[in-house]
Amino acid sequence: MLVSAIELLVSALELLVSALDLFGSKRHLLGSKLKLFVSAIKLFVSKPKLLINAVYLYL
């Protein structure tokens, strides 16, 4: 349940980033950084075991 909620949030972030990209090249750098951030979140959401291991190693 939590994972699907996070996936929904990530999808909303992707839409926001796409909308920012439409506003022109001035925000291109910001859009690229947001895309990278969203991709990182997507990776962790798609690999919950990886996220759990990362948290375990951090603690």
Image: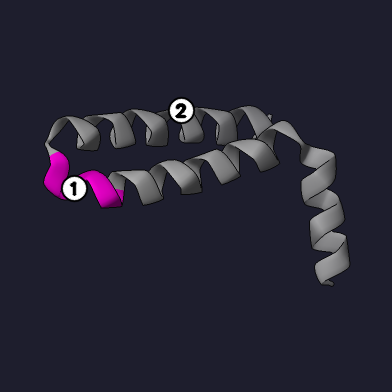
Query: Is residue 6 found left or right of 23 in the rendered image?
Result: right
The residue wearing badge 2 is 11
Mark closest to the chain's N terminus, 1 or 2: 2
Using residue 1 as the reference point, say whether residue 10 is left or right of it.
left
Q: Is residue 28 magenta?
A: yes
In the rendered structure, find residue 27 and report the number of the disc placed on it. Answer: 1
Mark 1 lies on a secondary structure that is helix
Marks 1 and 2, Cα distance to the nearest angstrom? Answer: 20 Å
| Nearer mark to the viewer, of 1 and 2 | 1
Mark 1 closeness class: few <14, some 14–19, many ≥20 residues within 10 Å = few
Q: Residue most toward the bottom?
A: 59
Residue 40 lies in quadrant: top right
**Residue range corresponding to the magenta coloring:** 25-30
Question: By what rule are the colours in the image chosen?
Answer: one colour
Across and down, in percent, residue 29 comes to 27, 51
Type of amino acid at the residue the image marks with label 2: Ser
Count every numbered label the image shows and give the total: 2
Q: Is residue 37 above or below residue 46?
A: below
The kind of residue tagged 1 is Arg
In the image, residue 57 lies at what x, y percent?
Answer: 87, 66
Q: Is 1 placed above or below 55 here?
A: above
Q: Quadrant of the C terminus?
A: bottom right
**Quadrant for the N terminus in the image:** top right
In percent of the image, x 51 and y 28: which residue is there? 8
**Residue 57 tag number:** none
- The residue located at (48%, 49%) in the rendering is 37
In the rendered image, residue 50, in percent from the top left (x then y), is placed at 81, 45
Give the x, y percent position of residue 27: 18, 47
Taking the magenta stretch, the answer to whether it contains residue 35 is no
Element marked by disc 2: helix
Left or right position of 42 against 29: right
